[in-house]
Image (tube, grey):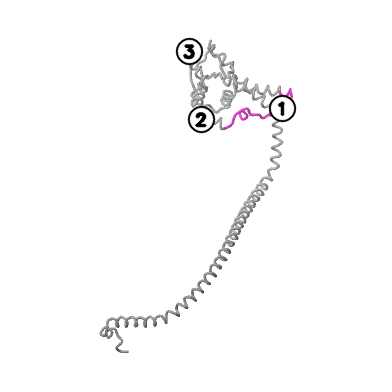
Amino acid sequence: MEDYTMESAKKVCGDVAGLASWTRAMAFFFGINKEVLPLKANLIIQEARLQKATAELNEAQGQLDEKQRELDLVQAKYDQAMRDKQTLVDDAEACRRKMGNATALIDGLGGEKTRWTEQSKKFDQQIQRLVGDVLLATGFLSYSGPFNQAFRTLLLDNWKKEMRKMKIPFSEDLNLVNMLTDAATIGEWALQGLPSDELSVQNGIIVTKAARYPLLIDPQGQGKAWIKKKEGPNELQATALNHKYFRSHLEDSLSLGRPLIIEDVGEELDPALDNVLEKNFIKSGKTFKVNICV
């Protein structure tokens, strides 16, 4: 109705206005509710569908998780298999390289068989001559020191004659210098001041290899200069028989293991040197002692 308004109701009565407001609200609610009720019904249906879909999703997710775990396990096995395959491939490649190198080495050394056979025969012969060669070398160290080059050569020739008579095998072309030392040592001696001639090299061998202490008859001073330079890094002590600290120098060198050179030696020696030169050492535990008190 046209007059069914809040203004008309307020003119009639306040209570009527409240009733009119309520009826209008109920009418509006009814109109809204006609639209909401289908939506609620649809909501219930959709919630049911959602619950079903969620259950299906959870089930599918569980299956997916299980398959993922299976896939991860299979992937791990696959990765391990690929690593094993790569390891085998690497080993096979390394083996092929080794085989190639071995084949090349065998092919390269195949031609050495003849030389090795000949060298082996030479070694056998050298072993047979070793006793005689060592005998000549020890004789050279023991007896050749006082003589010049010509007499040393004569002495060596006489020894060879005697050894032929005794049928002791030895090397006819024996080189005592090469047998008792090497080129590097000779070069080092040359840098230290030793002349490079054969006699000087032989003297150097006798000084360094002989068991006895060397006595140098050295008019030119070359031997003394060489020894001082050679033994300088080892704290060489130089002294003389008439030096006031000769005994102290001797005792210090013996106790500390330092080299000692006695210069300007005459025909007579200090008696304190007798036990040292004769090596009359007394073993005490792990050490050696010598009496130099005279």
Image spot of residue 178 (x, y percent): 61, 30
- Looking at the image, is mark 2 or mark 3 earlier in the sequence? 2
Q: Nearer the viewer, mark 1 or mark 3?
A: 3
Is 108 within the magenta? Answer: no
Range shown magenta: 163-183
Q: Are marks 1 and 3 in contact (CB under 8 Å)?
A: no
* Residue 206's disc number: none
In the rendered structure, which amino acid carries the disc numbered 2? Leu
Q: Earlier in the sequence, mark 2 or mark 1?
A: 1
Residue 77 horizontal side relative to residue 229, left or right: right
47 versus 146 height, above or below: below
- Asked if the stretch drawn in magenta spans residue 180, the answer is yes
The residue carrying mark 3 is: 242
Q: Residues within 10 Å of mark 1 (few under 14, many from 20)?
A: some
Residue 57 pos. (x, y %) = 53, 69
Per the image, label 2 sits on a secondary structure element best described as: helix
Amino acid type, label 3: Asn
The residue furthest left is: 11
Q: Quadrant for residue 147, please give it.
A: top right
**Residue at which label 1 appears:** 169
Kindly identify which residue carries mark 2.
Answer: 191
Residue 60 is drawn in which quadrant?
Answer: bottom right
Q: Earlier in the sequence, mark 1 or mark 3?
A: 1
Query: Element at badge 3?
Result: loop
Q: Residue at coordinates 39% horizontally, 82% vertically from top-left?
A: 30
Front one among 9 and 187: 9
Position in image of residue 182 (x %, y %): 59, 31
Q: Characterize the local packing of mark 3: few (<14), some (14-19) or many (20 or more) Cα atoms within 10 angstroms.
A: few
Cβ atoms under marks 2 and 3 closer than 8 Å: no
Locate the N terminus and report the quarter of the image it occupies: bottom left
Please tell me whether mark 1 sits on a helix, a strand or a loop: loop
Residue 115, position as x, y percentages in the image: 69, 40
